[in-house]
Structure formats: structure tokens, C-alpha cells
Amino acid sequence: MTEQRPRTAAMPEKPTLDGLEAVWVARWEADGTYRFDRSRTRDEVYSIDTPPPTVSGSLHVGHVFSYTHTDTVARYQRMRGREVFYPMGWDDNGLPTERRVQNHFGVRCDPSLPYDPDFEPPANAKGQVPVSRKNFIELCERLTAEDEKAFEELWRRLGLSVDWTMTYATIGEHARVASQRAFLRNLARGEAYLSEAPTLWDVTFRTAVAQAELEDREWPGAFHRIGFELSPEQREQGFGDRVWIETTRPELIPACVALVAHPDDERYRPLFGTTVRTPIFGVEVPVLSHHLAEPDKGSGIAMICTFGDVTDVTWWRELDLPTRPVIGWDGRLLNDPPEAVPAEPYKELAGKSVHGARERIVEMLAEAGDLDGDPRKIQRPVKFYEKGDRPLEIVTTRQWYIRNGGRDVELRLALLDRGTELRWHPPHMRVRYDNWVEGLAGDWLISRQRFFGVPVPVWYPLDGDGLPVYEAPIPAEESSLPVDPSSDVPPGFTEDMRGKPLGFVGDPDVMDTWATSSLSPQIAAGWERDDDLFRRVFPMDLRPQAHEIIRTWLFSTVVRAHLEHGGLPWKHAAISGWILDPDRKKMSKSKGNVVTPLGLLEQYGSDAVRYWAANGRPGTDTAFDTGQIKIGRRLAIKILNASRFVLGFGEAPAGERRVTEPLDLSMLAALRTVVTEATEAFEEYDYTRALERTERFFWELCDDYLELVKARAYDGNASAVTALRQALDVLLRLFAPFLPFVTEEVWSWWRAGSVHRAAWPSAADLQADPGAEPGRGVHGDPAVLGAVAEVLRQVRKAKSEARLSMRAEISRLSVSGPHAALVRQAQDDLCAAGNVEEFVLDPAGPDSTVSVTLAE
């Protein structure tokens, strides 16, 4: 960090919140207030693996919510004396960016087209103009650069204490190198592998989808009761001429490879081991048994197709069945029938969409007498890609995977153990991690058939016929990274051998965005790029994130660190909840119910919006509430005005700065408790509780203590003035993580340097004699302030009910009961604040009562 310039500013006549953000953002940047000092050792550093927001348009108020939580922790740790490593990343590769570029520029990527160095997107394109992959990537880079600039400006305005000299992008060179290096090492250790297998496929984006990116949505459908033809021998056993199945996917009949029922289902046991014929196509398929078949669902017997759903994949694999794919990458039925399926009836379906093929085959089944009754409409859960609009299909493709415990019990148990080593805030969020790991059905599919991403860094040799030898991939050399196999040449080859027999071909795929984001700690920390920095910050201290991506970002980061480093990537995980709209629904761009933050920051000020965010408890979903933001603004204004009021009393002479009065000592004792509670809360990552304790004391100080003590303060009483200035000093530091702008503004009126580089307060800061050795001061009784404040409230209540001014005279005030002895210690302050003429105390009274007699 650059050395801070000592400075204080004149206290304004009329303090205001307006314009504070612009003033202090510029000053913090000029002073290097949040610049990371890399000379500090690892034990002196607190490092944060900041979530890189997806750069695909604009931030919404949910981002402000969760990133504020992280910033309060960063500011607290900085004030505790730790050097905070707080970088910012941009997640700019992947499908969201591609979709935004397509819509923004009116283009689509066609890798078969040549690069046009002079291409400019059309001003008013109808539809989407095809462009080369390189042109498409250039447009992606252009738009993300604009978005990242806007994001940074908003984050600065919000007051994130990020070191803006340490930013990275998931498509940037450092990220590409780290991502490709990690993959190559996974490959060398046998943790990454290439496999041709059934794959969940989004037909809109035409890319594979990983298990972690799935979500179930209710989708309309219909059960069709369809007959499979029995042999004469089966009919003689009393089965009739058909066995009836019920399915929502009749268009997959040409992909049928078997029928299946439960082993204990007496209705179908005589059929096990025999064959039946598919309707329309007449293909013989076996009747088999499997424990996943559900006797009470439909007719109790189902067709196995390759592939209708994930259960089909399980049956296909465990029963060792053949493959008859019919769905293409574009979501249409293939032009040619699968093996053993006759071409004549299939041509009625070839090339049709899934919906169109379904309608046509239902007509054909009805005509053939193989459809029993009308389809029965239903709503059922269907798997979608979380960013997609159409149900997923399952197609057979060749993809890259990384082992994650889905097929390896030993690795799964090791990753579950990592979850127990990690400290979760709140603790119950670990259950989500455990449930996800325990429920994994396969390894992590990391390859994507897209364009704007980190290329898979391998090539394949071609045999004498020019066909790829996928079993012998040629990995890139680490020293050559980053590489793009579509334009770079593998070791031992030349460019003129590309695509020719005995030459090579590059892998056309890119890696899943999570395959790069899962390395965010390594990328930010300079893994094998800046060894000195890496030693000082890794493994990191904190991963803050939302709960819905525990299964994706958090888990995948644990996987990569476990495989590469043999440990966790961080010590703590702080989990934020969702922002809900007034109807208690999650805010999301896809639902169209998001609130953008810029207008809120302009209308209410950044401190007010941060106040609302900090009131959202860790891991708890929180409703968006402008009422809470207004309370935050009122608090910030009160801090300005109360601070000006306190500082207006001036400072006691140097030799008299001691706290001697019981009421003043009581206030400092109560504040010591607040400091302890706020510190304990922050140590448990409960920023909300820290704010609540601080705010409650502040309002009590303003409403009660200030009123009680101001008469003495106006008279220059050294005890009162010293206590007030001590309290203000501590409260500004307690509020600083939450309200950085107003606290910095007030601090500048009377203190040098930044409040955000000041030490976090401790009980030793609140002493009867500020010049004495810490811990040697006289401790007050916090009960005194509480007792006197309660009597003052009774006085105010009496005046309010009589509709009198708070300055109205009280002719007689009497206090009896056990609290009278406490009140006696501050009776002069109470009489001055309440304008009391006669004051009577009766400590021997049986009950705690307050009697107020108003003057005539």
C-alpha cells in the first residue's frame, strides 16, 4: 500500500451525504487505501477468493447484496491488522456472453466461415448474420470489455474495498494458461479422460451440459398407451395379442431397445427372456427385468430407448443393451434410421422436430391400431439446462470428463472429508455440499461445443485414412500455453499437415466455464506465474458465494485443489442467501423481476444500500425492501449530524482529559460490551449481528445519553466531552465496515489517515483516563445509564401525553425502588435534561416507580 497522506478536513456547517461517493472513491484510489502490500507474510495476510461476476449485461441488486457482505468482512479484517488480498475477477467466457453477443450485435458463429479482418456488425440486422469463429470471439471481447468497465464503476461507487490493480478475466491470458495447465496435469494423472457416452444435450445451444447445471421444471406432456406385438407362443399363454406400455415419448419408438419390468412383478415374469415387436417398425426387442422399474407406474412395464431420460441410460448400461440413437444435435430426428429399423416407416419421421415427430407417430399408431384410447395429459418434471429454454435431450457424443467422485467411492469419501475440514458460515450449509457429493451420478463433464471459452489443449493424430485416433491425444506442452488447437500446431507437426492423413486435427471444443472458474483462487494468486504472491495468499482464507452454486463453483473448486494441491483452496466458506422480490420469489434476469442498483445508489446513497444488504443474515434469503434502505439513509444522516454535534463541543484541555462522572463511565462501560459483541460476531462471520449491536447502541446514545449529558458538555465539562469523543471515535470504527463513506467523511474532520486503515476498536480504547496505561482506567456500571435513561423516557412520555414541549418544566419528579440508587449517581444530568424543579429519590421503596408532576 502506498503511504497515506495525513490530512483532516474542515467540518462543514451543513454536512450532507450527497457527493460523498465521488469524493472518497477518488481519494481512496489516490491514496492507495486498499492497495495490497505484498511484503507481508502469509500469517499477516487475509486473502479472499472473490466471486467473479458473470459479465453478460448488467448487475442487479442481488449482486450488491452478496458482495457487500464480503466487503464488510474484508474491511473488518483490514482494521484487525491483516493485510487483505481482495482481487476482483470477471467471468466473461461461456454461454451467457455468447447469447448476449448474438442478441447485441445480431450475429451467430459459423466456424466454417473464414475470418474477415474488416468485419463490422450490421446496424439493423434482420435475424443473425453468420460470422467466423475468430470474428465472433472478437465481438465477445469487445462487449465484455465494455461491461467490465461498467461493472467496475458500479462496484467502486458501492464502496467495495477491492485492490483494482489486481483484476483478472476468465478468458484472459493468465486464466487460459492456468485452466489449460490444470487440465493437462489432470490428464497426465489420469483424472481427465475422453469418453463417448450418452450426454445431456441442449439442442438450442448445441452443447453438452453437466449434472451440476441441471434443473427440473414442470413441463406439459401426455401418456400414450401403446401396444407391442406378442408372438403366437406368448398369446397362447394368455397375454392377448399385445403388451401395453405407457410413455410420454412415443417418437422414440424407433430408438427402443428393450422392454423392462420389475423382477417381482408377477404380471410380466413369464415374458422375461422373450422378445416382442415394436409397433409400426416391427423390430424385435427383449423383455427384461430391473429393480428400477416401477410396478405401480402406468402399466408397470416400460420401453427402454436410447435415450429418453437418465433412467434409460442406467438401464442401457447395466443391461448391456445396443444403441439406436434417433435424436440429432439440433433436436430433430436423424435423417437415417438406426441399425435394424426399417427405412420405409422411419422416413415419416426423418428430419422432424421432436414435437412434429411425436404428432406424426401418434397418427401412425392410431392408424395401425396400436394406440389405446386418447393421450392422457399430465404435468411432469423435465430436465433443463439452467440457462436453456427447451427440455434437454440425451445424445451420444465424445466428451472430456474430470473425475469428481461420481464413479470413484474412494475419491468421493475424500471430497466429503474436505467438506468437514472447511468452516461453513452458517454451519448448516455444509449439508448442501454433502448431499450433492453423495448424490453424484457421474464424473464432471467439462467440454462444451461452443466458441468463446478456453480451448481444450489437445490435438489428435490422423490415421492413414485421415480419421482421428481419439485414443492417442497429443497434449500441449506447458511451456507453450495458452494454445488454441484450431490455429496452433502440436509438437512434431507442421501446419501443412492439418487435416491430412497421418497429420493431425485440433480438438474443436472449449472447456466449461466452471472448469476455469473452479481455479479462481489459483488464477488470482498467480499460481506458477508469481510464486512469491502465491506463497503469501494461498490457500486463501475465505470463499464467499451464494448457496445455489455450492454444487457447482464451491464443489468444483474443492475438486481442483484436492487433485492439484492435496488440500482445500480456502479455510472458510461464507454463504449468502438469495434476494427475493415482494412476492418472496427469487430475483433473476430470466424471471424479469430484478432491480438494478444504480438508481438506488443515486437516490439513497451507497451507505444506505449497504446498510440494507448488511441486514441480510448469512445464508438467509432476504426480501428486497426500500424501507430498510431508507432507514439506512436516516442512520447515515444521523451519524453526520450527531458527529458534528459532539465535535462542536471541542476537546478538553490536555491535562483534564479524564472521564470521572458515573454517567459517562456507565456509557463507556456499555460501549465496551458492544465492542466485544461486535468483534465476536465478526469473528463468526455474522456481520448482521455486529451491525445490530452497534446501531442499537448508537441510537440509545443519541436519544438518551446525548440528551442527558449535553448540558454539562455545553459547559465544557471535561468528563462529558472526553467520553463523547471516545465514543464517537469507537463508533465510527464499528460502523466503518458497513457505512464506509459517511464514516470516512466524519473521520476526516478530526483524524488523520483513513478510518479504514485505523485499528478495530477494543475495550482498551475506552478508558476513564485516555492517557493512562491500557486496562488501568476506572470501569463504570452500565446499569447507571440504563436506569437514568428509563426515567428520562418516562418524563418525555408525560410531556408528550400532555402535548407539551420537551423543554417544559417538571415541578416534581420522584423515583423509588432499587433503581433509585443508580439514578442518584446522575441526578443532576437527569434534572437538567428533564427541566426538573424538585427531585425526590426513595431507594427504600418497594417497587420501581417513577412519578412525574408537570408544572402548572
Image (cartoon, rainbow, N blue to C red):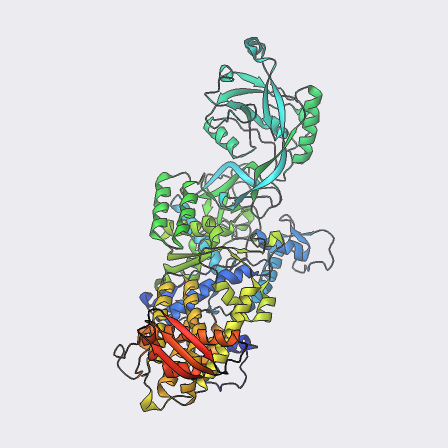
| Most foreground residue, 534 or 695 | 695
**Image quadrant of residue 747?**
bottom left
Q: Which residue: 40% across, 90% down?
A: 716
Seen in the image, is 338 located left or right of residue 724?
right
Q: Nearer the viewer, residue 205 or 71?
A: 71
Residue depicted at x 49% and y 85%: 11
Query: Looking at the rendering, which quadrant does residue 677 occupy?
Result: bottom left
Viewer can see residue 533: no
Query: Is residue 711 shown above or below 188?
Result: below
Percent from the top left, x then y, of residue 388?
60, 46
**Position in image of residue 130 (x %, y %):** 68, 51
Extreme-front residue of the structure = 856
Q: Residue at x 50, y 77 (%)?
A: 799
Among all residues in the image, which is located at the extreme top?
236
In the rendered image, residue 61, in percent from the top left (x then y), is placed at 56, 61
Q: In the rendered view, would you say 63 is above or below 470?
A: below
Please determine whether, in this image, residue 621 is positioned above or below residue 359: below
Left or right of 565 on screen, residue 33? right
The number of callouts visible is 0
Query: Residue drawn at (36%, 53%), measured in percent from left and top?
Result: 422
Quadrant (top left/top right/bottom left/bottom right) for the N terminus: bottom left
Q: Nearer the viewer, residue 15 or 141?
A: 15
Judge by depth and name the residue closer to the eye, 852 or 455.
852
In the picture provided, is 266 more to the left or to the right than 254? Answer: left
Where residue 234 appears, as percent x and y from the top left, is: 55, 11
Residue 420 appears anywhere in the view: yes
